[in-house]
Amino acid sequence: MGLLEVKVVAVGIDPRSRAFFVALKDQRDSVLPILIGSFEAEGISSKLLGEDPSRPSAYDTIKNILDATGSKVTRLVVNDLAEDTFFAQVTLNVSGREFSLDCRPSDGIALSLRCEAPLYVAEHVMKRAGGPVKLVAEERSGNPKWREAEAEPGQSKLEELMVKLRLLVEQEDYDQAAVVRDQIMKLQQEDA
């Protein structure tokens, strides 16, 4: 089974389906979008944004347990797709022995990011469900620009902010992304 190393390039909400997703991109610029839950999206995006939570998440706790026991996550592989469901395995090194455990891709990604372990997608999964990066651009003086997020009817304020945050991170506008991240955190605290 051939593996493609990937990076997380986006986490957000699809404005049409209102589903959370994570997008993984390989070196050939193919992107694999995977639908995930809101908790998992928060777990992945908080690490990408370098947030330091006041209380550890489940992923932080698992990493702390691994560190305390001298165990290490060595990689995550999104290794299969069946009936629109992605499957993954996280590989651990415990006392010099490696073994792999089945996991949901979203949980494995959130944990692997915290452990700074590489992420991979099996070639057959990327061929089946991935595709080339398609930038939505408009020509202004010959320079492509990312399309601004447009609010969808019935979309909540939190959903709008998550889409905006994703676009700002993609544009590498980290100052504005931090402002939007703070707005999201404030809304989430109000809802808690």
Image (cartoon, rainbow, N blue to C red):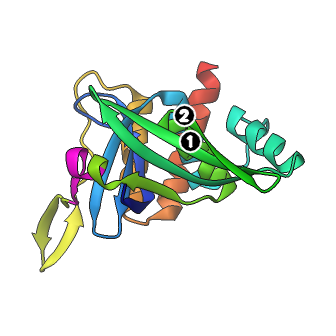
**Residue 156 is drawn in which quadrant?**
top left
Please report the residue visible at 83 percent of the width from the left and 50 percent of the height from the top.
67
* C-beta proximity under 8 Å, tags 2 and 1: yes
Q: Which residues are magenta?
A: 126-133
Q: Nearer the viewer, residue 181 or 115?
A: 115
**Relative image position of residue 38 (x, y in whole percent):** 49, 29
Q: Residue furthest bottom?
A: 142
Judged from the image, the secondary structure of the residue bearing numbered disc 2 is strand
Please report the residue visible at 22 percent of the width from the left and 52 percent of the height from the top.
127
Q: Is residue 78 magenta?
A: no
Q: Nearer the viewer, residue 63 or 137?
A: 63
Q: Amino acid at mark 1?
A: Gly
State which quarter of the image contains the C terminus. Answer: top right
Q: Amino acid at mark 2?
A: Cys
Side of 50 relative to 33 (left or right): right
Residue 11 disc label: none
Please report the residue visible at 36 percent of the width from the left and 42 percent of the height from the top.
163
Side of 161 relative to 133 (left or right): right
**Residue 43 is drawn in which quadrant?**
top right
**Relative image position of residue 104 (x, y in whole percent):** 50, 33
**Residue 143 is drawn in which quadrant?**
bottom left
Query: Does residue 159 appear in the picture of this structure?
Result: yes
Relative to 84, does residue 130 appear above or below in the rendering?
A: below
Q: Is residue 130 magenta?
A: yes
Residue 108 disc label: 1
| Residue matched to label 2 | 103
Total numbered labels placed on residues in the image: 2
Q: Nearer the viewer, residue 69 or 192?
A: 69
